Image (spheres, rainbow, N blue to C red):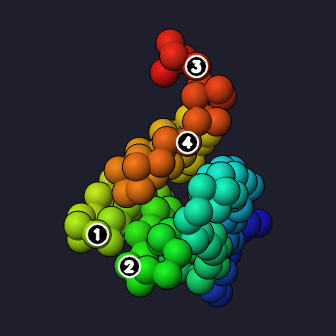
Amino acid sequence: MNTLRKLDDTHELHDVRDDSIRQAFVQALGEKARPLFEEAASYARNHDLDVVVDLVLEHDKPRLILAVSRPGEEPVSSYSLVANLAAQRMLHEEFYADSGDIHRQESLLASVNEKVIDTRLANFFRKGFALPLDYINERHPIGFW
């Protein structure tokens, strides 16, 4: 008895794998990173900054964006996490509107964790707006890093 058979559509199997990879990245953006972005946004709003957090679930490049500006000013700086599903990598991107500087770093999905995101958010707000995120020091006291 021949138990081997030709699959009519191997693309279907590929989609299942792609969907699970996409789901892992979307889950990391929504469940791990977004609460940290929202916490930083709330803190910044309490310090007179305009902040918007947006989770964009486009199929090929899901991303989480924190857009920040001073009230009444046009330039918007941003910190984004962009999933590169094909490479199974996460792009951390900081854009500073005042200087035009862009800092990009690709890393593994594991980089979407509290310690890394808190560090990047603290650096982003300090560099872009001279705003220290004091609550992060409470969560990660000196010597923790």
Residue contact at pointers 1 and 2, CB within 8 angstroms? yes
Viewer can see residue 8 = yes
Residue at label 1? Answer: 98
In this rendering, is residue 105 above or below 96? above
Viewer can see residue 85 = no
State how far apart marks 1 and 4 are (Cα).
20 Å
Which mark, by number, is residue 10? Answer: none
State how far apart marks 4 and 3 are (Cα).
13 Å
State how far apart marks 2 and 3 are (Cα).
33 Å
Secondary structure beneath dot 3 equals loop
Q: Within 10 angstroms of label 1, few (less than 14), some, or many (20 or more) residues? A: few
Residue at label 4? Answer: 133
The mark that comes first in sequence, 1 or 4, is: 1
Amino acid type shown at disc 3: Pro
Residue at label 2? Answer: 75
Q: Residue at x 23, y 67 (%)?
A: 99
Which quadrant of the structure image shows residue 52?
bottom right
State how far apart marks 4 and 2 are (Cα).
21 Å
Along the viewing direction, whichever of 47 and 34 lies nearer the viewer: 47
Along the viewing direction, whichever of 78 and 27 lies nearer the viewer: 78
Amino acid type shown at disc 2: Pro
Amino acid type shown at disc 4: Leu
